[in-house]
Image (tube, rainbow, N blue to C red):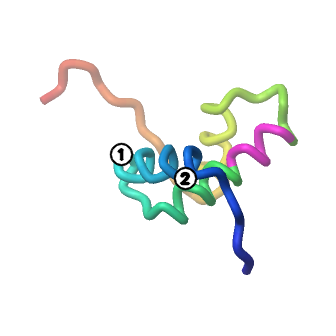
Amino acid sequence: MGIVNIDDDLHDQIRKASAVTCRSINAQAAFWIKIGMLCETNPTLSFNEVVTRELRAAGVVARPVKMGAA
């Protein structure tokens, strides 16, 4: 494990995003790093395709949401 030196503006964006996604600042940064790496190594996949692939690999089963259901 090491220390990553990032720009103050980027750190502020990570902090803001972490509040929205209910992740710690470190977890948000790690998520962006992992997704960025996966997108670079799989340039033909969209962000949603990358995330869907990772969720499936983790055993998450997403079910369609029925619109208008209460």
The quadrant in which residue 66 appears is top left
Q: Residue 64, position in %: x, y? A: 40, 31
In the foreground, 11 or 55 = 11
Give the foreground label among 2 and 1: 2
The picture places residue 48, in percent across and down from the top left corner, at 60, 32
Magenta-colored segment: predominant secondary structure: helix
Towards the viewer: 70 or 17: 17
Q: Distance between the residues labelled 2 and 1?
A: 15 Å
Residue at the spot 62% in from the left edge and 42% down from the top edge: 51
The outermost residue toward the left is: 70
Q: Magenta span covers which residues?
A: 35-40
CA neighbours of label 2 inside 10 A, class few (<14), some (14 to 19), many (20+): some
| Foreground of the two, 42 or 66 | 42
Q: In this view, does 16 lie to the left or right of 51?
A: left
Please tell me which of labels 2 and 1 falls first in the chain: 2
Q: Return the residue found at the far front.
A: 8
Q: Mark 1 belongs to which amino acid?
A: Val
**Callout 1: SS:** helix
Whether residue 43 appears in magenta in the rendering, the answer is no
Please report the residue visible at 36 percent of the width from the left and 45 percent of the height from the top. 20
User: Is residue 36 inside the magenta stretch?
Assistant: yes
**Viewed as shown, does residue 34 lie left or right of 29?**
right
Residue 11's tag is: 2
Badge number at residue 57 = none
The residue located at (44%, 53%) in the rendering is 15
Q: In this view, does 54 lie to the left or right of 9?
A: right
- Per the image, the residue denoted by label 1 is 20
Mark 2, secondary structure of its residue: helix
Query: Percent x, y for residue 16?
Result: 41, 46
- Expressed as whole percent of the image width and height from the top left, the position of residue 32 reads 63, 49
